[in-house]
């Protein structure tokens, strides 16, 4: 059934690409939506979460980010990562009270099980710092793939201020391998485990 949905999405994408010369700029948005659907389907098929849980996590991230943005705007920089309804908050807030309030905003959302509030107190991080974190995340994922010790999609990597957070549904051996690889990656200052164990 999964392969059928992907095939249909690919057919839809090809149809849109064929029609682009005859349509307005809106067609580009439709094409992007179809392509995103294909990517999400592939991601779900390789995930240990159920498809329903995967969608719930996406919804939690979107709702949390919207609430935080509505309340604080550009005064904070907060990344929301939900995995199996366990929500990791990273980034920067101007005060302890703001950090606590952000945690409560997310905790009060439907379906959230736990909140791991790792927000630092201080001004929003710089573009250079965020770019460095993105590079570290890419390096860690690349080394996971090269190591071949577990399915890469079973571990989610989040980097903030050179600290790497690892989330996922894993067994103990997979967790140990992930921590060892991440911790020995150039530029990583610290590794924090946010795993749920399957055994």
Image: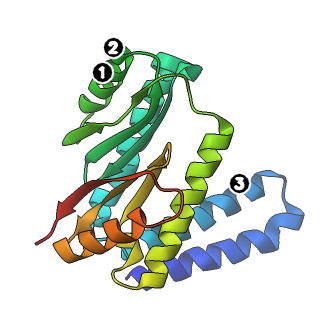
Residue beneath disc 3: 29
| Residue 7 in the figure: left or right of residue 21 | left
Residue shown at 39% from the left, 63% from the top: 183
Residue annotated with mark 2: 97
Q: What element carries label 3?
A: helix
Please provide percent x and percent y for residue 77: 52, 30
Q: Identify the image quadrant of residue 34.
A: bottom right
Q: Which residue is drawn at 56% across and 27% down?
A: 124
Q: Determine the image quadrant of residue 53.
A: bottom left
Q: Quadrant of the N terminus?
A: bottom left
Q: Which residue corresponds to mark 1?
A: 100
Image mark count:
3
Residue 114, position as x, y percentages in the image: 20, 41
Tell which tag, 1 or 3, sits nearer the viewer.
1
Q: How far apart are marks 1 and 3 (CA)?
A: 38 Å
Q: Quadrant of the C terminus?
A: bottom left
Instruction: Tell me whether circle 2 and circle 1 mark residues in contact (CB < 8 Å).
Output: yes
Which label's residue is closer to the chain start, 1 or 3?
Answer: 3
């Amino acid at each position: 059934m999964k392969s059928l949905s992907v095939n249909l999405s690919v057919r839809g994408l090809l149809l849109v690409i064929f029609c682009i010369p005859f349509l307005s700029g809106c067609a580009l948005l439709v094409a992007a939506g179809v392509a995103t659907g294909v990517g999400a389907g592939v991601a779900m098929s390789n995930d240990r979460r159920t498809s329903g849980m995967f969608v719930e996590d996406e919804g939690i991230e979107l709702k949390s980010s919207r609430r935080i943005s509505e309340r604080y705007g550009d005064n904070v920089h907060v990344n929301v990562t939900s995995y199996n309804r366990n929500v990791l908050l990273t980034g920067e807030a101007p005060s302890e009270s703001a950090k606590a309030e952000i945690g409560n905003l997310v905790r009060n959302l439907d379906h959230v099980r736990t909140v791991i509030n790792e927000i630092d107190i201080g001004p929003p991080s710089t573009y250079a710092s965020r770019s460095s974190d993105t590079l570290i995340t890419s390096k860690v994922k690349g080394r996971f793939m090269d190591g071949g010790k577990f399915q890469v999609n079973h571990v989610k990597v989040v980097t903030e201020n050179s600290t790497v957070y690892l989330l996922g549904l894993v067994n103990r051996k997979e967790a140990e391998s992930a921590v060892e690889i991440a911790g020995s990656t150039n530029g990583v200052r610290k590794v924090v485990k946010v795993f749920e164990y399957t055994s």
